[in-house]
Amino acid sequence: AGTVLETATVAEGATEVTVSKVDMLTAAGGTAYVTVTKANKLESTRTSKTYVTEPVSVAPAAGTITVENNKVGVADTVVVTGLVAGDVVNVYKAATGGTAVGTATVAEGETSVEIEVEQFGAAAGSVYVSVKGEGKLESVRTTKAYGAEITTAPLATAITVKNDATGSADTVKVTGLA
């Protein structure tokens, strides 16, 4: 049994036929089953033929993704490098499922893209980034962690305080800032 996806008739005097239909097969590959029915005959048994997956885009490497988790009022950004013109980059809050919270297409002559996202939130977390190349399926999602909006306090050992005599300038020096 099974559902007939499409049929075709062999032209008079021909010995072959091509069956074609948009999105007839699954993108992930699988098995097609083919039968033939000649005039005044019963349908043949099914012959199975496996087919490969459609081309899948390469997922971005975590090292090519930069995430800035900015304070409220400033858009958060995701920058992805190492791309080609026409690539579509999607940013998700979930490892699977859900809808993209940001998307952008790499412009002609460019190899990177910046995506603005309204806000990830104050806490540290992760985003999930995929790429869809032209004529290919969307890649798997790459996880990229980002820091909290709150600036990390300096260590006491990185602070030098000099309290000079009255009338002289006092100083507070902080090292190790990035």
Image (cartoon, rainbow, N blue to C red):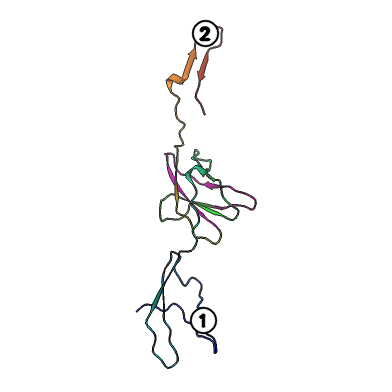
Q: Is residue 123 left or right of residue 75?
A: left
Residue 65 can be seen in this image:
no
**Residue mark closest to the camera, 2 vs 1:** 1
Q: Position of residue 105 (x, y in %)?
A: 57, 54
Q: Position of residue 18 (x, y in %)?
A: 52, 78
Numbered tag placed on residue 17 in the rendering: 1
Image quadrant where residue 38 sits = bottom left
Of the residues shown, which amino acid type is indicated by label 2? Asp
Q: Which residues are magenta?
A: 104-133
How far is the residue under mark 2 from the one under mark 1? 94 Å
Q: Is residue 159 above or below residue 11?
A: above
How many C-alpha atoms fall within 10 Å of the one at disc 2: few (<14), some, or many (≥20)?
few
Residue marked by disc 2:
164
How many C-alpha atoms fall within 10 Å of the one at disc 1: few (<14), some, or many (≥20)?
few
Q: Is residue 45 magenta?
A: no
Which residue shows up at 34% across the image and 79% down it?
1
Residue 42 can be seen in this image:
yes
Which residue shows up at 39% across the image and 84% down it?
44
Count of numbered tags = 2
Q: Earlier in the sequence, mark 2 or mark 1?
A: 1
Q: Secondary structure at mark 2?
A: loop
Q: Is residue 113 magenta?
A: yes
Numbered tag placed on residue 30 in the rendering: none
Of the residues shown, which amino acid type is indicated by label 1? Val
Residue closer to the observer: 161 or 43? 43
Q: Position of residue 160 (x, y in %)?
A: 48, 16
Residue closer to the observer: 57 or 91? 57
Name the residue at the left extreme: 1
Q: Is residue 167 above or below residue 11?
A: above
Which residue shows up at 53% across the image and 6% down it?
166
